[in-house]
Image (cartoon, rainbow, N blue to C red):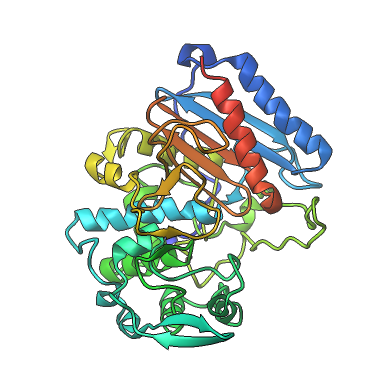
C-alpha cells in the first residue's frame, strides 16, 4: 500500500502473520487459555457481545489466536481477518508517529502547540461560576507533552456535561466531514476545561497531534502513518476506511445495547472521511494490531525495521502524571498513571485486575483492547464491537490471560 492509498486498507496483500508456537512452549497453559475462550463463548451465548477475537503472544510468538461468535449479530462467523473500528487504539499509533518526528528533530516536547497551530495562542480557560462560563487567560501555553498525556485542557463531549463539554456537544467537532485543519481551528476557538498541566482529562488531544503531524511532515495524517509506521510493519489492513470489497469482513455491534437498550451508533467503515481522526479514526484487524504490539514489546523494532528508538519508547511507557496533576474521570485505573499515549501500571496492587509493573496499554470505545507486558514478555490483543460492555470484557480478558501464565 503506497502513501497515496494510505487511508484505505485493501483486501490484498494480507497482513503477514507473526510466528506461532504451542502455548506450552511459551510458558502458557492451553487448558487455561481455552477456559478464557470459553468465557467469551458464554458471553456470546448470553447476548453480551456478537463476537470477539483474542490473540496472546509471548516471547515473540503467538500462543493463542481464537475467533469467537460472529462478526455481526446476524453475520458470518468471526474470522481472523475481520475488520474492526479500533477508535482510541488509534491514539498509540499516532503518539508513536509524533515521537518519531521528535526523534527527527522537528520539535521538543516542551514546545507550545501554538508554534504549529497558531490559533491555540488565543485559547482561554473556561471557569464555571454560578452556572455561567467565565473565560480567563491560560497560566502557561499548552505543550506537545500536554497533548500526549492529556493534560492539555482539552476534553471530550461524552466524558461529562460541564459547560465546556456542552459547547463541544453543540459544535461540529464530531463531524467526519470536516478536515483535520478545520477541526483544529474549531477546537482552538473553544475554551479549555482547565489550566494546561493541571488535570488529566481524556480528550481530543491526539486529534491535535495528528494535525501537528500534518503541519510538520507536509503530508496527510494517513499518508504519514502509512509511510513511517503501517507499511514498514506490514499493517496492510489498517486505514481510516476500507473498500467495498471488504464489506463482508466488517465487525458490527448490536443495534441496541443489550444491557441498557440504548441505540448504538458507530461510524461507517466503508465511508471515506474528510477528517482522519488521530484520536479514533482507524479501522484495523487483530493481526495488524498484533504486529504493532510486537514492535512495542520489542522496544521499537520488528523484522529488522526500527520504528522508534528504545529510549524514546521507554519515555512514552513511563508515567507522566506527577502528584500535582489531578486525574479526572475513570479511564486511568487505580494503581496506574498515564504516559505519552498509553496508560501505565505503577503499582502491583490497588488495581482490581492482575498485571505487572510497567505494563502499558490502551483501548477503544467500541470494545477493542491491547496491552504490553515487558516483564512477562507478553502482549494481548482483544477485538470486539460492544461499546457498552467494554470495561467488562477488558477485565475478563486480563483475568483469563494472566491465569494462563505458567
- Horizontal side of residue 316 vs 352, given as left or right: left
At a point 37% along the width and 83% down the height, the residue shown is: 123
> Residue 207 location in percent, x, y?
44, 66
Looking at the image, the residue that sits furthest to the top is 24
Q: Quick check: 295 left or right of 398?
A: left
Look at 48% across and 31% down and name the residue there.
355
* 141 displayed left or right of 230: left
Q: Nearer the viewer, residue 355 or 52?
A: 355
Which quadrant of the figure has residue 41?
Answer: top right
In this view, the residue farthest toward the left is: 105
Residue at left offset 80%, top offset 56%: 260
Determine whether, in the image, residue 49 is placed left or right of residue 215.
Answer: right
Q: Quadrant of residue 214?
A: bottom left
Relative height, residue 212 to residue 365 (above, below)? below
The residue closer to the viewer here, 101 or 271, is: 101
Can I make out residue 343 in this image? no
Q: Measuring from the top left, give residue 139's x and y in whole percent.
A: 30, 77
Comparing 269 with 9, the one in front is 269
Residue that appears at 60% across and 47% down: 83
Vertical order, 178 against 94 (above or below) = below
Numbered-mark total: 0
- Looking at the image, can residue 323 be seen? yes
Tell me where residue 387 appears, x and y as whole percent: 67, 53
User: x%, y% of residue 293?
Assistant: 43, 38
Amino acid at each position: 500500500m503506497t502513501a497515496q492509498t494510505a487511508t484505505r486498507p485493501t483486501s490484498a496483500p494480507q497482513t503477514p502473520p507473526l510466528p506461532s508456537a504451542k502455548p506450552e512452549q511459551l510458558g502458557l497453559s492451553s487448558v487455561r487459555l481455552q477456559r478464557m475462550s470459553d468465557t467469551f463463548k458464554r458471553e456470546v451465548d448470553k447476548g453480551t457481545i456478537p463476537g470477539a477475537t483474542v490473540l496472546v503472544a509471548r516471547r515473540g510468538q503467538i500462543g493463542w489466536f481464537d475467533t469467537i461468535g460472529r462478526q455481526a449479530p446476524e453475520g458470518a462467523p468471526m474470522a481472523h481477518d475481520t475488520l474492526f473500528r479500533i477508535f482510541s487504539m488509534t491514539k498509540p499509533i499516532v503518539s508513536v508517529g509524533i515521537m518519531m518526528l521528535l526523534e527527527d528533530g522537528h520539535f521538543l516536547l516542551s514546545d507550545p502547540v501554538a508554534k504549529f497551530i497558531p490559533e491555540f495562542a488565543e485559547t482561554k480557560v473556561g471557569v464555571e461560576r454560578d452556572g455561567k462560563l467565565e473565560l480567563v487567560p491560560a497560566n502557561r501555553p499548552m505543550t506537545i507533552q500536554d497533548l500526549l498525556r492529556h493534560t492539555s485542557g482539552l476534553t471530550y463531549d461524552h466524558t461529562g456535561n460541564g459547560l465546556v463539554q456542552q459547547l463541544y456537544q453543540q459544535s461540529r467537532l464530531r463531524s467526519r466531514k470536516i478536515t483535520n485543519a478545520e477541526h483544529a481551528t474549531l477546537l482552538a476557538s473553544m475554551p479549555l476545561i482547565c489550566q494546561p498541566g493541571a488535570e488529566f482529562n481524556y480528550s481530543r488531544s491526539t486529534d491535535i497531534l495528528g494535525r501537528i503531524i500534518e503541519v510538520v511532515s507536509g503530508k496527510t495524517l494517513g499518508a504519514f502513518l502509512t509511510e513511517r509506521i503501517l507499511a514498514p510493519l506490514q499493517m496492510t489492513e489498517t486505514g481510516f476506511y476500507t473498500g467495498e470489497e471488504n464489506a463482508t469482513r466488517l465487525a458490527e455491534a448490536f443495534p441496541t445495547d443489550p444491557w441498557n437498550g440504548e441505540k448504538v451508533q458507530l461510524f461507517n467503515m466503508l465511508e471515506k472521511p474528510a477528517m482522519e481522526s488521530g484520536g479514533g479514526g482507524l479501522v484495523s484487524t487483530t493481526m495488524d494490531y498484533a504486529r504493532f504490539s510486537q514492535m512495542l514489546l520489542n522496544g521499537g523494532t520488528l523484522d529488522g525495521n526500527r520504528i522508534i528508538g528504545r529510549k524514546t519508547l521507554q519515555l512514552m511507557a513511563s508515567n507522566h502524571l506527577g502528584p500535582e496533576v489531578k486525574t479526572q474521570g475513570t479511564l486511568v485505573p487505580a494503581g496506574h498513571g498515564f504516559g505519552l499515549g498509553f496508560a501505565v501500571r505503577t503499582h502491583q496492587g490497588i488495581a482490581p485486575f492482575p498485571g505487572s509493573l510497567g505494563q502499558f496499554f490502551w483501548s477503544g470505545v467500541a470494545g477493542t483492547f491491547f496491552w504490553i507486558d515487558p516483564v512477562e514478555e507478553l502482549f494481548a490483543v482483544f477485538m470486539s464491537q460492544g461499546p457498552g460492555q467494554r470495561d467488562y470484557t477488558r477485565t475478563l480478558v486480563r483475568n483469563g490471560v494472566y491465569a494462563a501464565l505458567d
